Image (spheres, coloured by chain):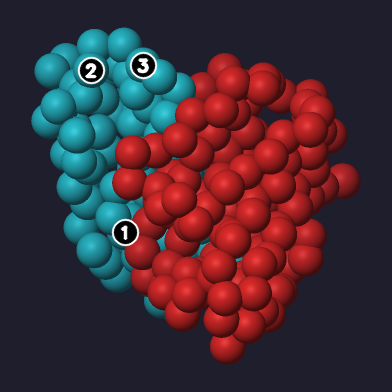
Chain colours: A red, B cyan
Amino acid sequence: DAMVIQNPRYQVTQFGKPVTLSCSQTLNHNVMYWYQQKSSQAPKLLFHYYDKDFNNEADTPDNFQSRRPNTSFCFLDIRSPGLGDAAMYLCATSRQNIQYFGAGTRLSVL
Amino acid sequence: LAKTTQPISMDSYEGQEVNITCSHNNIATNDYITWYQQFPSQGPRFIIQGYKTKVTNEVASLFIPADRKSSTLSLPRVSLSDTAVYYCLWKGSQGNLIFGKGTKLSVKP
């Protein structure tokens, strides 16, 4: 009964080839987040939505974009992936100050 | 930008109580302190959250002193399955979360 679902779990792309990661939720939460987590590091917030209001972290590269067409779905678009973008990407929702994470998508860049 | 400070790693044995402390000197007055557990190749999972004093649930306790500049996660009688990374984090007034560096807990038989 997964509540925050990320697809795919593993994604391989080529250097410079656009890639989209998907997240869906069954919790009907207003807030959704995208994090990047590199090996042995804490998750790093990229951006979040409150409903359709988009909030970009100041240090999130322009290479990263996001879309939220409705409450249930959120997408992370990496326009031109570089080798340094290889990481685990985590989607989360929140309600009452508690975050609910998906299992993540591990992105490899060849 | 406030930073959290946690020990990088801790070792324990099964059945022991484990206490992990986090420093968050610059936490704002309206911020919660939240702790998450993360296993390899999985997303973080909520453990416990508090604002002040002591909070206890079925898996852990959280102690927060009056000045709220630190918090201590207490795991009673750990088992091998508690081996994971534990993150302290606080929530800003804008709704964003900032994770600490994480503490890698290793529980040995």
Judged from the image, the secondary structure of the residue bearing numbered disc 3 is: loop
Disc 3 residue type? Ser
Residue B86 image offset from top left, x and y in percent: 40, 53
Disc 2 residue type? Ala
* Label 1 vs label 2, nearer the camera: 2
Question: Which residue corresponds to mark 3?
Answer: B93
Mark earlier in primary sequence (3, 1) = 3
Callout 2: chain:
B
Question: Which residue corresponds to mark 1?
Answer: B103
Mark 2 in CB contact with mark 3 (< 8 angstroms) = yes
* Label 3 vs label 1, nearer the camera: 3
Judged from the image, the secondary structure of the residue bearing numbered disc 2 is: loop
**Residue at image location 40% in from the left, 48% down from the top:** A60
Spatial CA distance of label 2 from label 3 is: 8 Å
**Residue at image location 24% in from the left, 63% down from the top:** B8
**Residue at image location 68% in from the left, 80% down from the top:** A12
Spatial CA distance of label 1 from label 2 is: 23 Å
Residue A98 image offset from top left, x and y in percent: 55, 28
